[in-house]
Image (cartoon, rainbow, N blue to C red):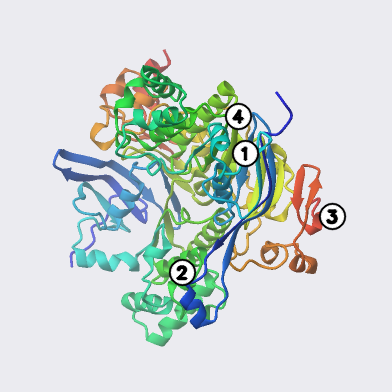
Amino acid sequence: MSAPIEKPSEKTPLLSVRDLVVEFPTRRGTLRALDKVSFDIAEGEVLGMVGESGAGKSLTGAAIIGLLEPPGRIAGGEVWLRGQRIDNLPREKMRRIRGRRIGMVFQDPLTSLNPLYTVAQQLIETIRTHMDVSDAEARKRAVALLDRVGIPAAARRIDDYPHHFSGGMRQRVVIALALCAEPELVLADEPTTALDVSVQAQIIDVLKEICAERGASVMLITHDMGVIAETADRVAVLYAGRVAEIGPVRDVIQAAEHPYTAGLMGSIPTLTQTAARLTQIPGSMPRLNAIPQGCAFNPRCPKVFDRCRTDRPELIDRDNGRHVSCWLYDGATQQVAHD
Amino acid sequence: MTDTPLLQVSGLTRYFDVSKPWLNRVLEREEKQFLTAAADVDFEIKRGETFALVGESGSGKSTIAKMIVGLVDPSRGRILFDGQEMRFEQGAAMRQLRRRFQMIFQDPFASLNPRWRVGSIIAEPIRTFGIASGADINREVGRLLEVVGLSAADAEKFPHEFSGGQRQRIAIARALSSKPEFIVCDEPTSALDVSVQAQILNLMRDLQDEFGLTYLLISHDLSVVRHMANRIGVLYLGRLVEEADAKRLFTEPQHPYTRMLLDAVPDLALSGRRRKPVTGEIPNPITPPSGCTFHPRCPLAVDLCKQQIPQVRGTPTGRAACHLLEEGAVSGT
């Protein structure tokens, strides 16, 4: 086994994604679905990842855990988990990291549980695969975990099959399954999208509490800005496979810097404000085979200027904990933009 | 303009037979089972307003929408459109009435025929109701496409050439083509991304102003409803638990379920409010709880709630069905 290479950084984040590129070769040329995506997740942090459909949220998650659907492949960049590079690991090694060090919660709890096995069998199998414990010990842990995620009468219900549980309860089981090997990172991809609002609030609370308790970091992928607002510490906004903006949740929501984020926030109706019209971003996100030159957002951007149409902006460090990929915030062009 | 409400719904009830096959019932000695999708629902919609029905899954929102447009027959109850009772067995008179209301569905990928050109999709109601003929039809189709923000040339394309938001625009153009007064919108934006949702909601508002449309908006998204509606009805397990003026529903919710629902919505404003933990899930509608169907989840439930179905009573903001409202136990927080 090769020794983990130390990343040149003063404080190593738990997960570090650098310039990740994911491509899909097709008959009509290669589509670039993720284009130089970079972000970090610190220990114990909840990073929200938002974007509209096709922005590449789920793909980022799948690339990190090595579950890209072929023919999709990582064509560049690096993924580091606590100083160890994991994007180029052989299948077998990656399989051990999944489940053990990175737990997963997916959108539809019915498809992430095996309908032919009881909840006990699935939990015990997972625990014993990753940890050296006896059957009885694994079962004890499983019951404790189910109890913790809020399943009433866990000791009895553990022997039920997934179809005996309601949607919300099933998602609790999936959370227990994701956490049973005590992972360092939990990747939750639209964990509440299939649930009703009243149940969604319960699941978000459970996920947040239990991860905080165990010191696990969370990468929360969702299209629902409200869920991010209540759950995440920082948020990354994706657009057409690129990171538009990353920053602390409150800052990004209340004072978005990237014109796309600002438009996105304005387009969400809220319970408190009473604007007669919602802000609307004209057009829609470009298809992967027609991403414009320069900034991917330039044809829809209200603040577009010449440079946006030719040069692609990199993430610019704004020195306030935020990174924005927009030429408006580049020192050299700031003058031009305001003229 | 008259004062008769455009749509009056009274005692609307729909059961679905969800029994096992006859032989199984005989062998397993089981009774027939019924699912009550809607029970004694009453409401009125005035001309030019947007009335919204909100509720979680299984609350009967879509069943009510389908009964109103005649896609599902009511088991009991009456629907009056512009003072005339809608009975779907009467042919010619119903046909006249039928032109005046339309529906927009949730999934624009399923509601447009993939083998038809957009022009034919939009022209179908025009032909069916004989609104125009010959070359006028194409002119009308082009005009409608422009009204919804597409171009007249798009009539030649097929639905797959459009994105979700554009397809929903086509569905809206089709709904408008029979020049209706009333449109039932069943989750019109829940399949769309937020930025596209904003475009569609703005378009719906513009069209309402331009053509004086009346909407029945069905949604599970409280913020969408808050943005669009004048009045809101809250459904729980097929019953209307509260109806109120849109703004006041959010500031002065009366029914405990409405309060719970409002508490559960993630807060984008980051006001830092600590929401009350919501308990429980929606019960199985085949075997709903006795009395008030919300009592097992209600933090304020008393014995009476388990025994008796509460009547709808007037409240300062509208009306609601809760035993406690009579005693004033819910007022204040």
Q: Is residue A20 left or right of residue A262?
A: left
Which residue lies under the disc numbered 3? B326
Q: Which residue is mark 4?
A: A275
Residue A269 at least partly seen: no
User: Which quarter of the rendered picture does the N terminus of chain A lie within?
Assistant: bottom left
**Residue at 63%, 63% in the rendered image:** B279
Discs 2/1, front: 1
Category of crowding for the residue at label 1, using alpha-carbon neighbours closer than 10 angstroms: few (below 14), some (14–19), many (at least 20) = many
Q: Are marks 1 and 3 on the same chain?
A: yes
For the residue labelled by badge 2, is the local secondary structure a helix, a strand or a loop?
Answer: helix
Q: Tell me what residue is drawn at x 21 percent, y 50 percent.
A: A72
Name the chain under label 3.
B
Q: Name the residue that disc number 2 marks.
A: A173
Q: Are marks 1 and 4 on the same chain?
A: no
Q: In the figure, residue A223 lies in which quadrant? A: top left
* Other residues around mark 4 within 10 Å, as few (<14) / some (14–19) / many (≥20): few
Residue B257's x, y, as percent?
A: 68, 55
Q: Earlier in the sequence, mark 4 or mark 2?
A: 2
Label 4 and label 2: CA atoms lie apart by 41 Å
